[in-house]
Image (cartoon, helix red, strand yellow):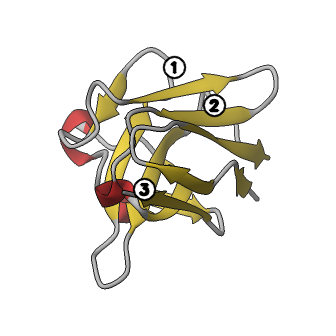
Amino acid sequence: QVSLVESGGGSVQAGGSLKLSCAAAGATYKKYCMAWFRQAPGKEREGVAAIYSDGDNKYYADSVKGRFTISQDRAKDTLSLQLNRLSPDDTAMYYCAAGGCPFPYDLRWNRSSVYHYWGQGTQVTVSS
C-alpha cells in the first residue's frame, strides 16, 4: 500500500514562489512513476509535472514549463515541486500521484487514469 501526503501549500502574491513536498510511504521509486496534478474550482484536474521511475526523465505541462521544477529525493522518499513566478492562474489544489509507467509514458503522463495512488492535496492560492 502506498500513502502520499502533500505539504507546502499556502498563499502568495503573484511572482512569488512555493515548494510543495510529497512524503511517499510504501512507494518504490524504481517501480512507480510519480506526478503532480492540480485542480482549480470548476475545472478538471490537470497534470502539471511528472517524473519517470528512472528519476531522470521529467515532463511538464506547457503552462508551467520554465517556472515549475519536479524533483525527488529517493533517500527521503520525497517528491517535490518548486513553483516559481506564480500567477493567479496557478491557484488550485495540488495533488501528488503515483502509478505505473505505461508506454508511451511521455504521451500519457498527464492522464489521471495512469495513477493508482493519490494524496489529499495541498492548496496553493496566488493573489494579484
* 39 lies left or right of 105: right
**Is residue 48 positioned above or below 41 on the image?**
above
Which marked residue is nearer to the observer: mark 3 or mark 1? Answer: 3
SS category of the residue bearing label 3: strand
Residue 84 visible in this rendered orientation of the protein: yes
Which marked residue is nearer to the observer: mark 3 or mark 2? Answer: 3
Residue linked to disc 1: 55
How many callouts does the rendering have? 3
* 31 lies left or right of 105: right
The Cα atoms of the two marked residues, 3 and 2, are separated by 18 Å
**Is residue 38 positioned above or below 104 on the image?**
below
User: Which of the two discs, 3 and 1, labels the residue nearer the N terminus?
Assistant: 3
Residue linked to disc 3: 37
User: Which of the two discs, 3 and 2, labels the residue nearer the N terminus?
Assistant: 2
Q: Residue at x 52, y 36 (%)?
A: 17
Q: Amino acid at mark 3?
A: Phe
Q: Quadrant of the N terminus?
A: bottom right
Q: Residues within 10 Å of mark 1 (few under 14, many from 20)?
A: some
Q: Quadrant of the C terminus?
A: bottom left
Residue linked to disc 2: 29
- Could you tell me residue 36's position as x and y percent? 47, 48
**Is residue 91 positioned above or below 33 on the image?**
below
Q: Are marks 2 and 1 in contact (CB under 8 Å)?
A: yes
Q: Depth check: 77 or 87 in front?
A: 87
